[in-house]
């Protein structure tokens, strides 16, 4: 079995939303929230996912099976106040002693 990972696009939103909604319908959530309206959940999540796909601070990836069907996804986002610039990251890699809150010992 071969799996392909690629960056997600807006065309992938419906498949991501479907996978997401299957994950949300758990007995625990139904106990807490009552019955879930999957159509309402999908509508709200599709809009959120489409917005975040266009956010440069976030990265979305999809996994496709051998039939090119999306079977999984991943989302990464740095907290806004912790997002480092490229210069900060480069400086920390070269000189780890400059990382705030980190004491470098040889």
Image (spheres, helix red, strand yellow):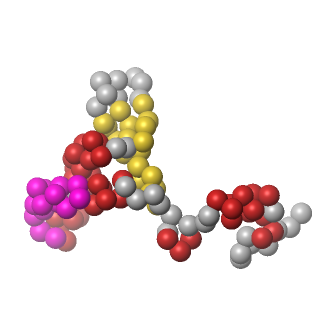
The percent position of residue 29, horizontal first and vertical second, equals 21, 65
The percent position of residue 21, horizontal first and vertical second, equals 22, 53
Residue 34, magenta (yes or no) = yes
Q: Quadrant of residue 51?
A: bottom left
Residue 49, magenta (yes or no) = no
Residue 81 appears left or right of 61: right
Residue 105 appears left or right of 22: right
The percent position of residue 75, horizontal first and vertical second, equals 41, 53
Identify the residue at horizontal 36%, vertical 53% (top origin): 53
Q: Main secondary structure of the magenta part?
A: helix
Q: Quadrant of residue 36?
A: bottom left
Residue 79 appears left or right of 53: right
What's drawn in magenta, residue-wise?
33-47
Name the image quarter holding the C terminus: bottom right
The residue lying toward the viewer, choosing from 59 and 25, is: 59
Identify the residue at horizontal 22%, vertical 45% (top origin): 14
Q: Is residue 71 above or below residue 88?
A: above
């Amino acid at each position: 079995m071969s799996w392909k990972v690629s960056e997600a696009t807006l065309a992938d939103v419906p498949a991501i939303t479907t996978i997401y909604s299957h994950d949300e319908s758990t007995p625990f959530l139904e106990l807490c929230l009552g019955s879930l309206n999957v159509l309402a959940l999908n509508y709200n999540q599709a809009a959120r996912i489409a917005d975040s796909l266009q956010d440069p601070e976030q990265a979305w990836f999809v996994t496709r099976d051998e039939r090119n069907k999306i079977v999984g996804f991943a989302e990464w986002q740095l907290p806004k106040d912790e997002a480092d610039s490229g210069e900060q990251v480069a400086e920390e890699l070269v000189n780890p002693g400059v990382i705030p809150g980190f004491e470098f010992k040889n």
